[in-house]
Image (cartoon, grey):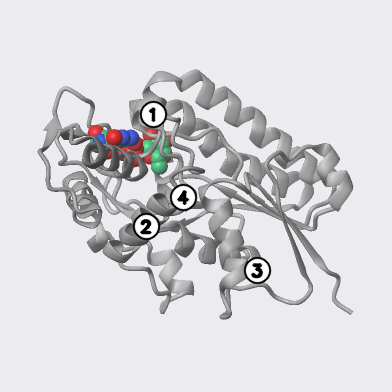
Amino acid sequence: MTTEKVIIVTGGSGLVGKAIEWVIENDNGRFGRKDGEKWIFLTKATRAIFEKYKPTHVIHLAALVGGLFKNLKYKLDFLRDNLLINDNVLHTAHEYKVEKVVSCLSTCVFPDKTTYPIDETMIHNGPPHHSNFGYAYAKRLIDTQNKAYFDQFGHRFTSVIPTNVFGPHDNYDLQDSHVIPGLIHKCYLAKKNGTPFVVAGTGKPLRQFIYSRDLAKLFIWVLREYDQIDPIILSVGEKDEVSIKDVADTIVKYLGFGGSYSFDTTKADGQFKKTASNAKLLSYLPDFEFTQFDVAIQESVNWFLENYDKARTGNPT
Ligand code: GFB
């Protein structure tokens, strides 16, 4: 008789947590809810939660996160808060003999000076980009913690490395958000108030973006089937890399914005690119279907318009 899997998801009310919940509830294919699985989506993961649910598996998403401009301002908070959150969750998982923990890193952890495409073996090969070194080092250390828990106790704690994520339930705060929710919100306000739509920076930097609901399916696959301690990059292919200008153009199209649209080159561009290889992922899931970028942006814009009143907008006028 197989024992029931009790899966807790830390940071369960955020962008990725909500996407995993959506897939578990709505996907009738290989990624949806399976018999013998109990899923619990948490906002705070403390000892009391482990005591209450006695989880067998953990998807660890809870973190202090933010876009370029928030990272530039709060490097110590990003380092310290994430170090403390990760140690708390991983050590509590150790004490409660959790079978598996899947933690979430980001491709910003990789060295800034590197060859491309970036792959999983390069994670500790040199300093990350200065704009987010606080967050990057705290997240890199999860890989080190996983290896230490395996070495000393044999725990199967692993991690995934997504590229930039976007989708429903994002954080749309104008200062602290990532680029896609930030530009969706800015363009929406420009259209509503008849004011100019201004994109920060030159628009030239390149990024690979993964839709939160695609990432959610891959998280569920990693939880159920990926058996390594070493991390795995979860990303669209290198050929799907787009510029910040491409992103802004697509958002302007789906919001139907016809006003003045410009770039504020006095604002930072951040890292020019962090082109990552998804070869390892495709070696496991060669037929995985990623949602087309345009379709994912349209769904994200529609979700924002339908949920503006309850979305995390930071309450601008
Ligand atoms: O998503 P983002 O903030 O972070 O994207 P990173 C930043 C890029 O978008 C820069 C441009 O080139 C910005 O100049 N941009 C243009 C904007 N307009 C805006 C805007 O309104 N808001 C924002 N945020 N950007 C982050 C790391 O780097 O990536 C985090 O700092 C994390 O730690 C995240 O890893 C996934 O891709 O530059």
Q: Earlier in the sequence, mark 1 or mark 3?
A: 3
User: In the structure shown, which secondary structural element does the residue marked by tag 3 occupy?
Assistant: helix
> Distance from label 3 to label 2 (Cα)?
31 Å
**157 relative to 174 in the view: left or right:** right
User: In the structure shown, which secondary structural element does the residue marked by tag 1 occupy?
Assistant: loop
Q: Position of residue 152 (x, y in %)?
A: 76, 44
In the rendering, which numbered label is found on residue 316?
A: 1
User: Which residue is denoted by mark 3 in the rendering?
Assistant: 224
Give, as a three-letter code, the residue at label 2: Asn
Whether disc 1's CB lies below 8 Å from ligand 1 is answered no
Query: Answer yes or no: do the residues labelled 3 and 2 have beta carbons within 8 Å?
Result: no
In the rendering, which numbered label is found on residue 302?
A: 2
> Distance from label 3 to label 4 (Cα)?
32 Å
> Distance from label 1 to label 4 (Cα)?
15 Å
Query: Answer yes or no: do the residues labelled 1 and 3 have beta carbons within 8 Å?
Result: no
- Residue at 72 percent across and 34 percent down: it is 88
Would residue 163 be visible to someone looking at this image?
A: no
Ligand 1 falls in which quarter? top left
Whether disc 2's CB lies below 8 Å from ligand 1 is answered no
Q: Earlier in the sequence, mark 2 or mark 4?
A: 2
Q: Position of residue 304 (x, y in %)?
A: 40, 50
Judge the density around disc 2: few (<14), some (14-19), many (≥20) Cα neighbours within 10 Å: some
Nearest the viewer among 16 and 190 is 190
Q: Earlier in the sequence, mark 1 or mark 4?
A: 4
